[in-house]
Image (cartoon, grey):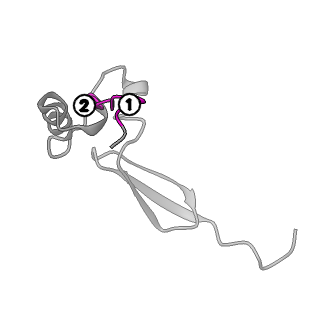
Amino acid sequence: MQEGIHPTYIPTTVTCSCGNSFVTRSTRKELKVDICSACHPFFTGKLKYIDTAGRIEKFQNKFAAGSYTSAQKPKAVKKKKPASVGDEG
């Protein structure tokens, strides 16, 4: 390993949005995370929906209203009648 090319490793405080915090080591002084092992459903065994600004309801309302383009049925295309041999104009 070459000397002087590696960043310094310092004690770091990691703070979660749930209020949990712990100390580890990193190149940054502090880290802020949205989810940690104290509030993650895999580790807690509890399912918790994080719904910011009603995104789930907005999606369901849009889907139910039929304004969601992938859910709409394609419009029927009218087929043109083939011209008869005697209909030349």
Span colored in magenta: 72-87
Name the one closer to the observer, 66 or 43. Answer: 66
- Give residue 45's position: percent from left, percent from top: 36, 20
The x, y position of residue 25, in whole percent, is 57, 58
Is disc 1 placed on a helix, strand or loop?
Answer: loop
Question: Split into 4 quadrants, where in the image is the N terminus?
Answer: bottom right
Identify which amino acid the numbered label 1 is placed on: Gly
- SS assignment for the magenta stretch, majority: loop
Where residue 69 appears, as percent x and y from the top left, is 27, 38
Numbered mark located on residue 35 in the image:
none
Q: Residue at x 29, y 49 (%)?
A: 17
Residue 3 in percent (x, y) is at 83, 77
Q: Which dot marks residue 72?
A: 2
Q: Is 46 part of what is drawn in magenta?
A: no
Who comes first in sequence, dot 2 or dot 1? 2
Residue 79 lies in magenta, yes or no? yes
Spatial CA span between label 2 and label 1: 41 Å
As drawn, 41 above or below 51: above
Indicate which disc residue 86 carries.
Answer: 1
**In this view of the protein, which residue sits in the foreground, 28 or 71?**
71
**Residue sitting farthest toward the top:** 45
Query: In terms of depth relative to the viewer, which is nearer, 54 or 36?
Result: 54
Q: Amino acid at mark 2?
A: Gln
At horizontal 40% and vertical 41% (from top left) the residue drawn is 36
